[in-house]
């Protein structure tokens, strides 16, 4: 009911503001003269006795290079108009701001009751040429691009000197630390030629970076705070830049001070390792000093919350080292504590005071609480194609509530997480009626340009062979927005705006072929429950037979944000398929022959999952845990059994290098048990790049029949660990892994498989975010009937 009221106000109210305020404003603007360019009003000139006299003549003198029409176009003063000294001064200011004149002055003369006006100008001379003498590392055209002027531009001594500094900076960034750049002042004055003379001197490379005097932190940690890197052939230039080294020393010093070493001082010295002074050892000298602890925390200005309540919010405690980052997080936490209770204008500041005891400081926190605010009108802006309700349903806060900044921050994340908006900001604004205890909410979104996309590519893997991938997807679909004509459909003005997802995918390949179409409504019946429905066709050759499937599914899902299941997601899915087992080989296993022909399969599946990983494709932290129960025969069919599965994966970042690349350790496990008699095409199999490396796709399976066909098992247990680390920039990573597990006909472990290996991950930005995988694995434990494979790979190449 309340949402409907908001929607009504969101249309009528907006139109009243538009027509009542905008139309009169346009009429006012229409009466204002249009200026050639924005002008800053000059200070009012003293009144002149010539003001109001008619201008009979206007002449311009002093011109050499500039056309007279250029000056006249900059001026408002005209022949035939009354003279105004204020207007004349504005004209002079406007001409001077063009930077083309050294001086401009007006000389009005009264003749027979009218004004003869002469405008005297002194032009800036033009740059005749720009030359570079002694430049070898850079081409003259590249140096010229870095300057703010070129031949033909007005000569400005400030820009010439600035160009001198710019050229020196370019050389120093390239390692020419002792470059000398000068310009010829005489040629500049007499011939207007800008001639830079460059003495490059030697190029200096840093061969070694050392730290001296550091005790609290080792050199590996401190190297992460500096930009200067030592020379590595091909991979790193190691260029020495004195300004960069100075910044590095300041960064290391701040690193110490932010961790309680308030007296820390860091400098650097240069030590050349060769006579030519081209190889440099850079040593940062660290004087750590005393590490200060907090002797007391004092809070002032608080009335809403007691001092004990605010201290309970803080992580920093008396006796702790003074860590700047922790203190800043505490200040933010205090401000959030106020902001979540409606005190959105509260300000929290601090200062540190040295205590009388050596090595100790007092932290003084001052709070300006302000007043408590409630939520007023919620205005949505920026949704030109997306329905307003799509934005409002992600807010989850309403008028007349206490204004809670934690709710607005979560709403911003949810809006960007939909994929419909590239930006989303929520800010409080003073309401038009100036209510003292209310703040309206302005929600501004920027719609993503990639809600509709067409993707075509080709992929290859050891598990699936070579296959194409053609995808047509619309993430802002509206199944109820049918076009009124073909023109609307072809121009993309139909089926859009409701935040639904429609996806069609075709994957033709050498080993399998698949086509599927999926539709998803994230808010079914305007409730926070997702609804998905889809259909698919699939065909692939199996061991001893060909498998063909056709069917559909529908599901309901929900993510819990509060209560006992906070952070968990649940899904209830139903599927119905026709499964054809065809082209069965002679003497195939009995379990295959039992399902030869057509089979009707229906299942209901309940899944519960918890995911805290930081990335879908390249996780470095967090975990994912899932449990599922699938019941076959839920809607009739040829089979009745239950399948219970569960899995978990956990990632830890062990190290972060100088280039912010992470070394990650991961462990995983999956298990499953079938209760009842499941057909071969629904049982468990293992092996392959996404299951157990070192074994062929589905190479781990119970076998039966004269041909020892793979017939799958009722019990599966897979586990493993992987260590991933950077090799070259952010493009190539290395991995070591250990995969273990088994698939058995019944609950229990008869044969344990294991493989040890390594590989590389290649992520090229032009090919997308999914890395290419190349692995070598050697089975160290296997069953005699297992199919092994040493080399596994996956390659994905999008066309567009």
Image (tube, rainbow, N blue to C red):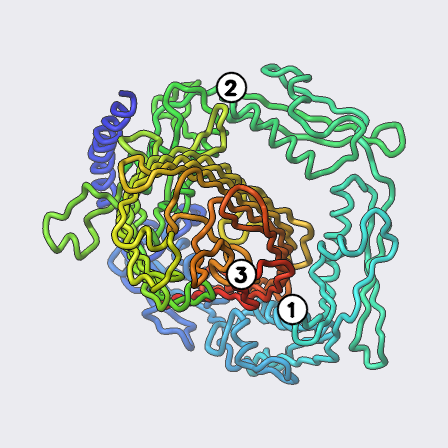
The secondary structure type at the circle numbered 3 is loop
Instruction: Tell me residue 207's x, y (percent).
Output: 78, 71
Task: List the residue tagged with mark 1.
Answer: 169
Write down the residue under mark 2. 371
Assess disc 1: are there few (<14), some (14-19) or many (≥20) residues with their C-alpha within 10 Å of its C-alpha: some
Left or right side of 722 for 240:
right
Name the residue rendered at 35%, 45% in the picture: 420
Q: Nearer the viewer, mark 3 or mark 2?
A: 3
Residue 681: percent from left, percent from top: 37, 51
Task: Determine if residue 364 is in view.
Answer: yes
Among the two numbered marks 3 and 1 on one chain, the one whose residue lies closer to the N terminus? 1
Give above or below for 582 relative to 208. above
Report the Cα–Cα distance between label 1 and label 2: 51 Å
Identify whether 228 is placed above or below 495.
below
Q: Is residue 129 left or right of residue 42?
A: right
* Residue pointed to by mark 3: 786
Cα–Cα span, label 3 and label 2? 72 Å
Q: Residues within 10 Å of mark 3 (few under 14, many from 20)?
A: some
Q: Secondary structure at mark 2?
A: loop
């Amino acid at each position: 009911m309340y949402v409907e009221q908001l929607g009504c106000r969101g249309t009528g109210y907006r139109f009243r503001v538009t027509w009542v305020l905008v139309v009169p404003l346009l009429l006012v603007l229409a009466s204002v003269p249009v200026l050639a360019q924005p002008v800053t009003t000059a200070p009012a000139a003293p009144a002149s006795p010539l003001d109001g006299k008619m201008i009979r003549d206007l002449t311009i003198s002093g011109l050499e290079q500039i056309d007279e029409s250029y000056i006249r176009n900059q001026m408002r003063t005209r022949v035939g108009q009354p003279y105004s000294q204020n207007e004349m001064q504005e004209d002079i200011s406007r001409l001077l701001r063009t930077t083309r004149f050294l001086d401009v002055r007006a000389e009005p003369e009264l003749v027979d009751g009218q004004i003869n006006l002469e405008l005297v100008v002194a032009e800036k001379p033009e740059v005749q040429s720009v030359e570079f003498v002694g430049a070898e590392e850079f081409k003259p055209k590249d140096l010229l691009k870095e300057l703010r002027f070129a031949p033909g531009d007005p000569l400005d001594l400030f820009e010439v000197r600035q160009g001198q500094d710019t050229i020196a900076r370019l050389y120093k960034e390239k390692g020419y630390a002792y470059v000398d750049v000068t310009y010829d002042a005489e040629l500049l004055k007499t011939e207007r030629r800008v001639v830079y003379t460059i003495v490059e001197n030697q190029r200096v490379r840093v061969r070694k970076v050392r730290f001296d005097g550091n005790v609290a932190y080792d050199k590996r940690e401190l190297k992460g705070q500096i930009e200067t890197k030592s020379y590595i052939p091909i991979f790193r230039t190691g260029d020495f830049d004195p300004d960069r080294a100075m910044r590095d020393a300041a960064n290391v010093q701040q690193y110490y001070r932010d961790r309680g070493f308030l007296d820390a001082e860091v400098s650097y010295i240069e030590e050349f390792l060769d006579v030519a002074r081209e190889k440099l050892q850079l040593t940062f000298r660290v004087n750590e000093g005393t590490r200060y602890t907090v002797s007391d925390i004092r809070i002032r200005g608080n009335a809403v919350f007691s001092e004990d309540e605010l201290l309970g919010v803080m992580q920093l405690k008396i006796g702790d080292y003074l860590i700047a980052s922790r203190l800043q997080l505490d200040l933010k936490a205090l401000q959030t504590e106020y902001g979540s209770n409606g005190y959105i204008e509260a300000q929290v500041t601090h200062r540190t005071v040295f205590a009388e005891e050596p090595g100790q400081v007092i932290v003084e926190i001052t709070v300006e609480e302000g007043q408590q605010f409630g939520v007023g009108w919620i205005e949505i802006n920026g949704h030109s194609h997306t329905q307003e309700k799509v934005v409002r349903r992600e807010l989850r806060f309403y008028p007349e509530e206490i204004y809670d900044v934690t709710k607005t921050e979560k709403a911003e994340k949810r809006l960007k997480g939909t994929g419909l908006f590239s930006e989303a900001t929520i800010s409080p604004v003073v309401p038009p009626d100036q209510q003292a205890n209310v703040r309206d909410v302005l929600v501004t979104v920027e719609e993503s340009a990639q809600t509709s996309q067409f993707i075509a590519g080709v992929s290859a893997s050891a598990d699936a062979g070579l296959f194409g991938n053609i995808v047509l997807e619309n993430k802002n679909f509206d199944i109820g927005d049918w076009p009124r004509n073909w023109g609307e459909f072809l121009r993309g003005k139909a089926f859009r705006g409701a935040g639904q997802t429609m996806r069609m995918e075709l994957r033709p390949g050498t080993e399998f072929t698949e086509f599927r179409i999926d539709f998803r409504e994230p808010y079914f019946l305007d409730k926070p429950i997702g609804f998905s429905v889809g259909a698919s066709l699939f065909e692939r050759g199996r061991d001893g037979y060909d498998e063909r499937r056709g069917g559909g599914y529908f599901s309901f899902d929900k993510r819990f944000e509060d209560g006992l299941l906070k952070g968990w997601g649940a899904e209830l899915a139903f599927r119905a398929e026709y499964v054809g087992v065809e082209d069965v080989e002679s003497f195939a296993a009995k379990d295959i022959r039992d399902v030869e022909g057509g089979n009707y399969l229906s299942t209901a599946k309940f899944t519960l999952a918890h995911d805290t990983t930081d990335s879908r494709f390249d996780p470095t932290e967090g975990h994912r845990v899932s449990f599922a129960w699938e019941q076959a025969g839920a809607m009739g069919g040829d089979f009745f059994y239950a399948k219970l599965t569960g899995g978990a994966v956990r990632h830890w970042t062990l190290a972060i290098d100088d280039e912010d690349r992470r070394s990650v350790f991961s462990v995983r496990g999956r298990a499953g048990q079938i209760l009842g008699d499941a057909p071969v095409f629904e049982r468990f199999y293992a092996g392959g790049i996404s299951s157990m490396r070192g074994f062929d796709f589905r190479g781990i399976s119970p076998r039966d029949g004269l041909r020892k066909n793979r017939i799958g098992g009722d019990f599966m247990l897979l586990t493993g660990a992987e260590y991933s680390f950077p090799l070259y920039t952010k493009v190539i990573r290395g991995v070591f892994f250990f995969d273990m597990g088994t698939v058995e006909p019944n609950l229990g472990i008869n044969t344990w498989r294991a493989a040890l290996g390594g590989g590389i991950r290649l992520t090229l930005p032009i090919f997308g975010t999914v890395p290419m995988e190349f692995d070598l694995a050697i089975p160290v434990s296997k069953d005699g009937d297992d199919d092994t494979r040493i080399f596994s790979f996956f390659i994905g190449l999008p066309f567009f």
